[in-house]
């Protein structure tokens, strides 16, 4: 449904141009990277609301991009007049007859074509221009005076909107919290409302009114007769009871979903999350819509999460665009790494170019910590746990810091495919180095293996093998690089045992003993190359 | 598919009803836009649509609203990025000597769009936006009807031409013989097509293959004698087909009559006709009657009408002097309001062949040649 999201000046997003996938988007990013903000912004433009309340009511100075505001205030303090900071959120919709009424110029300043879409802008109300100028010129001003701002919500037709256009279905499912006391928050209420066709809604609403009238006529009448005989109020009025006919008491406020015959609010939080997601995804198929799910992994056991993700996968269809934020590699791997959208520093990066067999590869490894790989700054990929431990130690010996303190994440590949990792690293633009045993390959075979990876290897992505003459795996390489007596004492083994054999049989133990030893060892040459390569940011 | 249809319909041929019927026949889900110029006609269309059982989605809008919603608001950034539109200014005069590229030709300093220049701006926007507004209409509507199309003039004609290039089926209904209003009196574009001359523009589009013109020449309203007189107002060069009357009703006072001024009150007493005049300066001696002007009478049906002719109309009745377009159109509107009879207030019959009506109990001799 949503083909493009442009955000300018809103919170993290100084200038974002994001083109989501038509069916599935898994948004990942570090904490505070702007995942939720992105969903919130989409919701603002599509519904004019945030947290169930009109944008104008929720508007506050922290909505504005901090950099924008700081630059503006700094200039104002020096008497330089720049245009006041603005927020603009534009959501472009796909070409669809249902959205025809929302079509107009695709940009307010430099249109190149037209499209269906919605635009929410927060701008200075020119009527308050003088008050605003007087306020911001004061150099102590830190925050924008948003009381002088106005929220302008329109379709691309450029006609102000009063409410969400009917053709647009957007459900927000926040599995993190259950908001209102009744357990039915604004979003869920909307989902229930959208779930019913207009005919059904009319029928239910009429029946509900009839029930209320019957109740009043049949049972309240007697009570009222009694009340009428009671003491008079001021002006000789009497108290009587009647049903509440205000919108507060409309049918949808009295309807609560039940999960296995248990009222929604009393169901487990995991059940609630699943129920919300299923309700949102199962709406009438003819309506194009979008569903935004925040962190489905919360409140769910591993098994339930699995069930839920299956649901999400099967219910998503061409007419139903899904946005999911997650902190879980499991969710990401299951839903597909190619659907990943990495949110960081106010940008959103797609991974659609990831070959489908690679996405499939990670889907079969749901337990693998793909997110750690994607979110890392620089990566070192090693063969196994003992390599991981030793890399840490050698790095610390050399620079007296842990790699992670320099933003370097060290990972065990545990025999997984180098090619798949490199594809992911290439797409996410990671600087990385893979340390590989030569396993007895000749120089020629190594060159060939590297050549086969083509442009997956370059100045920022290296695949390093242990030197052929220095040993097949890490252990002989260490033996090669160090004095045997020093090594024996570090490992605490007797003369009787062969060092290489012992280390080969006790890989993890050997690595831990080296790591814990007060005596530093000399790293194998390919480790040195890797440390120097990765330490320098490129 | 592009191009469109023009249904040229005589007065009383139920042309508005033909739009209502087409809307009622449209399937569920069809999106239909009905555009018309006058507010009265919008109200009438909405009222009649509300009474018919519609399956389709039908919107009735005025011509200017149509331009605002489909062209100006969505596509203004193509010409004036950043321009705020706060509303429409109906009073702004024609901006003489202001460039067609200038913002202030189209907008007041407070951001009101000047209605007088809105059609021109809309035509320019269609061009600047590379006809995207037409694509927008194609996405939004399955059929567009324009009622009373003869009211359009000047830049409106350029907009109609654009609509003819648009793939949405366009059906225009109107009667150039009733071209007594124009959307824009001061407009100087296409002066050769003003009022009834818009017929020449339609014929040009037809020759260029953009327009199919069909005629509805049957009137259910006007008595044959009334229809014959109405037809006679236009000479053969117009090439209008003769009106066929389907009015079978007969009374003892059908056709065209003359009435002397001093018999007007008696005539009104006897037949209760709708009195019509050019403007309120005519026949001031009878201001107590419930006069309508020709312009205001448009769209109405009356059993009988009583017309106060202008000098030119008198010359037509007395000497057969042909009328110029606008007068002919106004008289046509006046005459065709009537189902059974039209009476002219005329004291000097000249060569007029129409019979005089006089009250039967009167003994007074008609006064001739005085006014």
Image (spheres, coloured by chain):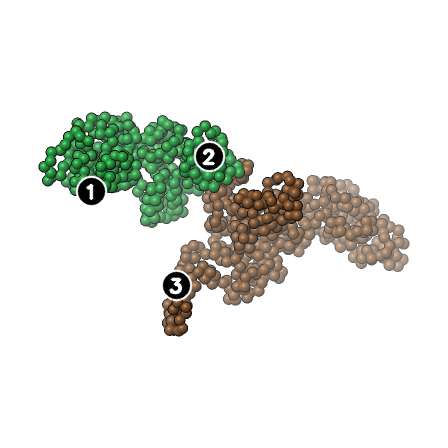
Chain colours: A brown, B green
| Chain letter for the residue marked with disc 3 in the picture | A
Q: Which mark is residue A456?
A: none
Whichever of callouts 2 and 1 sits on the residue coming sooner in the sequence is 2
In contact (CB < 8 Å): disc 1 and disc 3: no
Q: Which mark is residue B106?
A: 2
Quickly name the residue at label 1: B272
Q: CA distance from mark 3 to mark 2?
A: 54 Å
The answer to whether residue A25 is visible is no
User: Of residues A168 and A436, which is closer to you in this image?
Assistant: A168
Classify residue A300 by image quadrant: bottom right
Tell me if residue A351 comes above or below residue B367 in the rendering: below
Quickly name the residue at label 3: A210
| Nearest to viewer (mark 3 / mark 2) | 2
Tell me if residue A221 comes above or below residue B289 in the rendering: below
SS class of the residue under badge 1? loop
Residue drawn 53% across the image and 55% down it: A52
SS class of the residue under badge 3? helix
Tell me if residue A191 comes above or below residue A526 in the rendering: below
Q: CA distance from mark 2 to mark 1?
A: 48 Å
SS class of the residue under badge 2? helix
| Nearest to viewer (mark 1 / mark 3) | 1
Q: Position of residue A356 (x, y in %)?
A: 61, 46
| Left or right of residue B357: residue A120 | right
| Chain letter for the residue marked with disc 2 in the picture | B
The answer to whether residue A212 is visible is yes
| Left or right of residue B192: residue B283 | left
For the C terminus of chain A, the quadrant is top right
Q: Position of residue B57 (x, y in %)?
A: 39, 46
Residue drawn 37% across the image and 35% down it: B183
| Chain letter for the residue marked with disc 1 in the picture | B
């Amino acid at each position: 449904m949503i083909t493009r999201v442009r955000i300018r000046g809103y919170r993290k997003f100084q200038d974002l141009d994001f083109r989501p996938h038509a069916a599935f988007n898994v948004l990942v990013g570090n904490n505070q990277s702007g995942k939720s903000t992105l969903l919130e912004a989409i919701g603002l433009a599509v519904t004019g609301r945030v947290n169930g309340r009109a944008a104008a009511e929720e508007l506050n100075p922290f909505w504005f991009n901090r950099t924008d505001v700081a630059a503006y205030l700094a200039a104002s303090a020096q008497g330089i007049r720049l245009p006041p900071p603005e927020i603009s959120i534009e959501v472009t919709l796909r070409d669809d007859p249902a959205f025809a009424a929302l079509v107009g110029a695709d940009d307010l300043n430099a249109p190149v074509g037209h499209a269906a879409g919605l635009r929410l802008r927060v701008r200075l109300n020119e009527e308050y221009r003088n008050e605003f100028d007087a306020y911001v010129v004061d150099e102590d001003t830190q925050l924008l005076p948003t009381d002088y701002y106005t929220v302008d919500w329109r379709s691309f037709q450029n006609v102000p909107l009063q409410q969400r256009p009917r053709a647009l279905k957007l459900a927000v499912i926040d599995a993190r919290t259950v908001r209102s006391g009744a357990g039915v928050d604004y979003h869920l209420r909307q989902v229930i409302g959208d779930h019913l066709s207009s005919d059904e809604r009319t029928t239910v609403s009429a029946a509900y009114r009839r029930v209320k009238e019957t109740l009043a006529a049949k049972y309240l009448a007697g009570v009222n007769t009694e009340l009428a005989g009671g003491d008079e109020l001021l002006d000789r009025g009497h108290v009587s009871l009647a049903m509440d006919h205000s919108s507060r008491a409309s049918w949808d406020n009295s309807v609560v979903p039940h999960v296995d015959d248990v009222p929604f609010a009393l169901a487990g939080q995991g059940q609630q999350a699943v129920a919300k997601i299923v309700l949102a995804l199962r709406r009438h198929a003819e309506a194009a819509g979008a569903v935004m799910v925040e962190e489905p992994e919360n409140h769910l056991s591993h098994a339930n999460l699995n069930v839920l993700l299956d649901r999400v996968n099967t219910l998503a269809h061409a007419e139903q665009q899904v946005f999911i934020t997650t902190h879980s590699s499991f969710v990401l791997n299951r839903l597909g790494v190619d659907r990943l959208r990495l949110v960081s520093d106010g940008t959103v990066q797609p991974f659609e170019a990831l070959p489908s067999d690679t996405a499939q590869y990670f889907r079969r490894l749901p337990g693998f910590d793909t997110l750690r790989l994607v979110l890392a700054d620089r990566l070192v990929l090693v063969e196994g746990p003992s390599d991981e431990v030793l890399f840490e130690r050698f790095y610390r010996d050399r620079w007296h810091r842990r790699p992670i303190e320099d933003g370097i994440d060290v990972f065990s590949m545990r025999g997984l495919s180098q090619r798949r990792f490199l594809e992911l690293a290439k797409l996410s633009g990671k600087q990385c180095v893979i340390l590989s045993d030569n396993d007895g390959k000749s120089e020629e075979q190594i060159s060939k293996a590297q050549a086969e990876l083509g442009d997956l290897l370059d100045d920022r992505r290296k695949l390093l093998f242990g030197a052929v003459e220095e040993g097949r795996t890490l252990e002989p390489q260490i033996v090669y690089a160090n004095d045997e007596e020093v090594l024996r004492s570090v490992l605490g083994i007797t003369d009787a045992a062969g060092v290489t054999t012992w280390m080969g049989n006790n890989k993890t133990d050997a690595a831990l003993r080296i790591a814990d030893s007060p005596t530093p060892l000399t790293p194998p040459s390919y480790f040195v190359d890797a440390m120097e390569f990765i330490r320098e940011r490129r | 598919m592009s191009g469109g249809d023009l249904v040229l319909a005589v007065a009383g041929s139920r042309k508005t009803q033909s739009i209502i019927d087409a809307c009622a026949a449209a399937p569920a889900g069809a999106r239909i836009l009905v555009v018309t110029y006058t507010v009265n006609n919008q109200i009438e269309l909405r009222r009649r649509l509300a009474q018919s059982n519609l399956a389709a989605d039908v919107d009735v809008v005025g011509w200017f609203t149509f331009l605002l919603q489909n062209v100006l608001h969505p596509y203004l950034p193509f010409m004036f990025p950043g321009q705020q539109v706060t509303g429409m200014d109906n009073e702004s005069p024609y901006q003489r000597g202001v460039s067609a590229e200038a913002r202030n030709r189209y907008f007041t300093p407070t951001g009101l769009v000047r209605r007088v220049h809105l059609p021109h701006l809309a035509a320019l926007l269609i061009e600047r936006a590379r006809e995207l507004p037409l694509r927008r209409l194609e996405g939004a509507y399955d059929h567009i009807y324009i009622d009373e199309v003869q009211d359009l003039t000047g830049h409106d004609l350029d907009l109609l031409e654009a609509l003819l290039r648009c793939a949405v089926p366009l059906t225009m209904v109107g009667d150039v013989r009733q071209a007594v209003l124009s959307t824009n009196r001061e407009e100087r574009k296409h002066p050769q097509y003003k009022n009834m001359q818009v017929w020449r523009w339609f014929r040009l589009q037809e020759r260029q293959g953009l327009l199919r013109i069909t005629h509805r020449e049957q009137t259910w309203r006007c008595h044959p004698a009334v229809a014959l007189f109405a037809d006679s107002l236009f000479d053969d060069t117009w090439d209008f087909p003769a009106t066929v009357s389907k009015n079978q009703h007969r009374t003892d006072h059908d056709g065209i009559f003359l009435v002397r001024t001093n018999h007007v009150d008696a005539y009104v007493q006897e037949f209760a006709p709708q009195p019509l005049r050019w403007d309120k300066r005519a026949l001031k001696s009878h201001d107590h009657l419930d006069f309508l002007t020709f312009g205001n009478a448009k769209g109405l049906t009356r059993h009988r009408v009583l017309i106060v002719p202008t000098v030119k109309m008198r010359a037509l009745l007395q000497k057969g002097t042909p009328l110029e377009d606008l007068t002919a159109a106004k008289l046509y509107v006046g005459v065709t309001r009537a189902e059974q009879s039209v009476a002219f207030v005329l004291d000097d019959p000249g060569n007029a062949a129409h019979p005089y009506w006089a009250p039967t109990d009167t003994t007074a001799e008609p006064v001739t040649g005085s006014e």
